[in-house]
Image: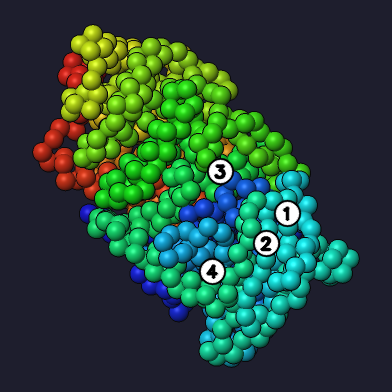
């Protein structure tokens, strides 16, 4: 059995001599989503295509209306260009090992240059302003380079104006202030409309020529609704190296020596990009409205903190031995829930407030696939599985040696009571569907929530009364009985999506790792899901959705985890080997992958995709060790249910 096949590229190497290729072609201004690498500073994320163009950057903050959103509107969204003047060039790129700093090499017939892209961090963490730094080093020959910084207004909220100051020109978009500094970069000041090429928009632009050993620097700095610090470009140059050191320092704290180490480490770094350091919240993804199919109408904003995704992230970071990020995320989530009436919410703004509604923008959408929305409509839904997400992660947090405060104990006990009270209701399920049903995975989630609460009580971290304790145990058993009667189909050989339906739901695979079922029924469900929802190594979310969208990356990794939990370790390893190489060339995933041609679909970097990869690697590694000493079916607290299942 092998378990060492890694995702490409090998993150221990910078570049490979045979990795040169043409840049991804732009069609009407757009490139394939697989083309994008991501950089970040703990407050925002930029997406950089293989041709050197930044097509997404909400600046200086991820929740800001983006002044650079060419990924969803190539004409009016804005962009940051940097590329050789000669269009006939080749590219290779890689992250600086252990960092979220991206290096791209361009090779023309006249020479080779290397671009280092970073969102610069400070001596003590993130800077209080934004610094996008692009450093160009001449390696061989002489290469003519051109660049442009073109703010856009595709979201219709911030027309760009020019403000002249004693320190140079400023571009202002509503409350966002942008200035550019640098050296050896051939800068031309912003033009007025009608003064640029073909009467183009306000922009910074320039051109220069490299030589061996030359160095040029561009730094776009920005603030929102506050004064703008204008940095010394030589200090910014040093800041790029400091940013590399900061990321490398974080990576030394990261502990994972198990299988698929490169893919796991890159996924952990991708998750780190999504941690919004001003509050500790964790964004589901860095972008909005990248389409889930090629026909439109499924384009939503993911720049919010989903309770589910945050819980999974905290769980993964805790398992890697990290301290600060899990505690910050837990503290932020608990504070936000307490501040919002102790009510469970599906997702929250990154500042902890309850999201408002959705707004359709004027953007045309990636490759014309719209509409493009700011906001997400799922906030008002009932999703019963969220109770499991928060209580289970707090159980993991407490079992890791941390102590819960009194108000958190009250909050979690209240959520356990809610799970007992509401598990019999219909909900929208994990997939946020408009059709409310008795989704089986939601019932399993309520079981997990109550089971986790009982576990917290056992270690003295919750203090229910004897009556409450019996109430929790009774409802945990009732849920198992309900699923045995209504959620399992012997004819289908699988857990159903909901009763009175033959539909399958890949989210039930989450409840092999949760401990609900690690026996024969789950094993049979895995086989049925692979047969009916599988597309090669990838998996669709539920029955019939293949007509509407691509395969859901996380579901495939959930299947690998479930295989391990039912004792099918060799199959789990083989599947993981196939899945980790589905990433793009720098190890990133979107939300979905087209089953037809492997194109990326959905927002990126997608936290849930990377979380599922990380947790699958951990689960497979742990189960390979544990299964020799423990039974495969470990539905704790319900031996009778185990017996029923084994005899079914």
Specify few, some or many for label 4: CA neighbours under 10 Å numbering under 14, 14-19, or 20 or more.
Answer: many
The residue that appears at 57% across and 60% down in the rendered structure is: 130
Seen in the image, is 466 located left or right of residue 165? left
Quadrant housing residue 252: bottom left
- The mark found on residue 173 in the picture is 1
Mark 1: secondary structure: strand
Specify few, some or many for label 1: CA neighbours under 10 Å numbering under 14, 14-19, or 20 or more.
Answer: many
Q: Which of the two discs, 3 and 2, sits closer to the camera?
A: 2
Among numbered discs 1 and 2, the one appearing first in the sequence: 1
Specify few, some or many for label 2: CA neighbours under 10 Å numbering under 14, 14-19, or 20 or more.
Answer: many
Among numbered discs 1 and 3, the one appearing first in the sequence: 1
What x and y, as percent, mark residue 611? Answer: 39, 45
Among numbered discs 3 and 2, the one appearing first in the sequence: 2
The residue that appears at 79% across and 58% down in the rendered structure is: 161
Q: Dots 1 and 2: beta carbons under 8 Å? A: yes
Q: To which residue does mark 2 refer?
A: 178
What x and y, as percent, mark residue 268? Answer: 38, 53
Q: To which residue does mark 4 refer?
A: 117
Which colour scheme appears in the figure? rainbow
- The mark found on residue 303 in the picture is 3
């Amino acid at each position: 059995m092998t378990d060492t096949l890694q995702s490409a590229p090998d993150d221990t190497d910078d570049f490979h001599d045979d990795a040169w290729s043409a840049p991804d072609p732009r069609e009407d201004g757009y490139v394939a989503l697989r083309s994008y690498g991501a950089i970040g500073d703990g407050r925002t994320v930029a997406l950089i295509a293989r041709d050197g163009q930044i097509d997404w950057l909400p600046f200086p903050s991820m929740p800001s209306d983006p002044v650079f959103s060419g990924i969803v509107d190539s004409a009016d969204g804005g962009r940051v260009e940097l590329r050789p003047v000669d269009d006939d060039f080749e590219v290779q790129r890689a992250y600086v090992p252990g960092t979220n700093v991206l290096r791209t090499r361009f090779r023309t017939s006249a020479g080779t240059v290397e671009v280092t892209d970073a969102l610069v961090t400070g001596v003590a963490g993130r800077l209080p302003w934004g610094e996008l730094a692009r450093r160009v080093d001449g390696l061989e020959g002489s290469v003519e380079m051109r660049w442009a910084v073109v703010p856009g207004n595709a979201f219709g909220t911030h027309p760009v104006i020019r403000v002249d100051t004693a320190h140079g020109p400023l571009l202002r978009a509503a409350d966002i202030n942008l200035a550019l500094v640098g050296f050896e970069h051939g800068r031309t000041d912003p033009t007025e409309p009608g003064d640029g090429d073909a009467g183009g928009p306000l922009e910074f632009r320039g051109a220069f020529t490299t030589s061996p050993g030359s160095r040029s620097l561009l730094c776009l700095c920005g603030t929102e609704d506050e004064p703008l610090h204008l940095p010394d470009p030589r200090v910014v140059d040093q800041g790029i190296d400091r940013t590399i050191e900061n990321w490398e320092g974080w990576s030394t704290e990261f502990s994972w020596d198990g299988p698929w180490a490169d893919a796991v480490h890159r996924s952990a770094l991708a998750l780190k990009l999504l941690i919004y350091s001003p509050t500790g919240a964790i964004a589901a993804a860095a972008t909005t409205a990248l389409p889930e199919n090629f026909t439109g109408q499924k384009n939503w904003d993911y720049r919010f903190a989903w309770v589910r995704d945050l819980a999974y992230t905290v769980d993964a970071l805790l398992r890697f031995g990290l301290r600060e990020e899990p505690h910050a995320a837990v503290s932020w989530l608990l504070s936000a829930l307490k501040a919002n009436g102790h009510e469970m919410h599906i997702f929250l703004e990154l500042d902890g407030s309850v999201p408002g509604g959705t707004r359709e923008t004027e953007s045309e959408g990636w490759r014309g696939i719209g509409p493009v929305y700011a906001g997400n409509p799922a906030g008002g839904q009932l999703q019963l599985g969220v109770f499991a997400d928060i209580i289970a992660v707090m159980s993991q947090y407490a079992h890791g040696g941390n102590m819960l405060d009194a108000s958190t104990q009250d909050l979690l006990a209240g959520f356990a009571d809610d799970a007992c009270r509401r598990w019999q209701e219909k909900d929208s399920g994990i997939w946020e569907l408009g059709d409310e049903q008795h989704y089986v995975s939601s019932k399993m989630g309520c079981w997990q929530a109550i089971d986790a609460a009982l576990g917290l009580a056992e270690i003295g971290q919750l203090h229910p009364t004897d009556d409450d304790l019996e109430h929790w145990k009774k409802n945990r058993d009732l849920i198992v009985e309900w699923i045995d009667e209504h959620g399992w189909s012997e004819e289908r050989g699988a857990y159903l999506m909901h009763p009175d339906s033959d539909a399958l739901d890949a989210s039930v695979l989450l409840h092999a790792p949760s401990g609900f079922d690690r026996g024969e029924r789950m094993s049979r469900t895995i086989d049925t899901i692979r047969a009916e929802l599988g597309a090669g190594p990838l998996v669709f979310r539920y029955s019939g959705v293949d007509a509407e969208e691509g395969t859901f990356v996380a579901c495939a990794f959930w299947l690998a985890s479930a295989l391990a939990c039912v004792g099918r370790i060799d199959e789990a390893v083989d599947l993981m080997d196939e899945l980790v190489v589905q990433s793009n060339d720098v190890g990133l995933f979107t939300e979905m992958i087209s089953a037809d041609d492997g194109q990326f679909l959905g927002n990126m970097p997608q936290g849930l995709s990377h979380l599922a990869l990380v947790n699958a690697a951990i689960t497979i590694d742990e189960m390979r060790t544990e299964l020799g000493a423990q039974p495969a079916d470990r539905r704790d607290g319900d031996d009778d249910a185990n017996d029923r299942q084994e005899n079914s």
